[in-house]
Amino acid sequence: MAKKSVLFDLDGTLTDSGEGIINCVIPALEHFGLPVPSREALRVFVGPPLQDSFIQHGVPADKAEEAVAVYRSRYIPIGMFENTPYPGIRELLEALTAGGHKLYIATSKPEGMSREILEHFDLSKYFTMICGASMDFSRNTKEAVIAYLLEQSGESENMVMVGDTKFDILGAKHHGIPAIGVSWGYGKVEDMVAAGAEAIADTPRQLLELLEA
């Protein structure tokens, strides 16, 4: 059955944002005198809430918001644009829109930043609503963002989530929404499968086929 409302994650799903995120994580870790892992190891920062990732890398829990503030001091003017849409994404969004699907953004990136990035790449026009995290950390998990989207949109039926990490799959599952994982992002395919992904798409073309099946 075709799903008429598609919820998309942003980082690692629509755009390859790793360079900008990692470039901003490094000075935040250095701010606390913490060891800086390899860039490959820092890929885990793409997707989950930043506070959680900083705590897992040694930032004291009561300093997590300070770490995010240091991160944002570079990310907002520079890092968010060290980013590019994945090949085939624009064509995917055009095809889904032409096919009558409603498209939404459900990301744990702050909502204002998400909107600015999508507008920068001329992608915002494809989305009925862009829902993201709040700057004050009151809405920062994927579960909370999806709950906010459902409340704001009034949608509840015939929905599917698309994301690149287990957090996308689990957040959707919490609300009874099936989810499809994509393999080109920053999460592990095995983690998405274990979390309950309905399927894994290896290309935007394959994702389109899954969504229209």
Image: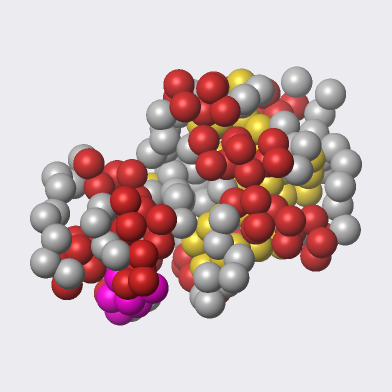
Give the residue at x 72% y 49%: 103
Q: Residue at x 60, y 36 (%)?
A: 169
Q: Is residue 50 left or right of residue 197?
A: left
Can you say whether 180 is above or below 144 in the image?
above
Name the image quarter holding the N terminus.
Answer: top right
The quarter holding residue 55 reads bottom left
Residue drawn at x 21%, y 40% as measured from the top left: 40
Q: Is residue 156 left or right of residue 91?
A: right
- Quarter in which the C terminus is drawn: top right
The quarter of the displayed image where residue 99 is located: top right
Number of marks present in the image shown: 0
Q: Position of residue 17 (x, y in %)?
A: 37, 53
Asked whether the viewer can see residue 92, the reply is no
Question: Residue, x 61% and y 66% (percent of image)?
Answer: 139
Range of the magenta residues?
Answer: 65-73
The verdict on residue 31 being magenta is no
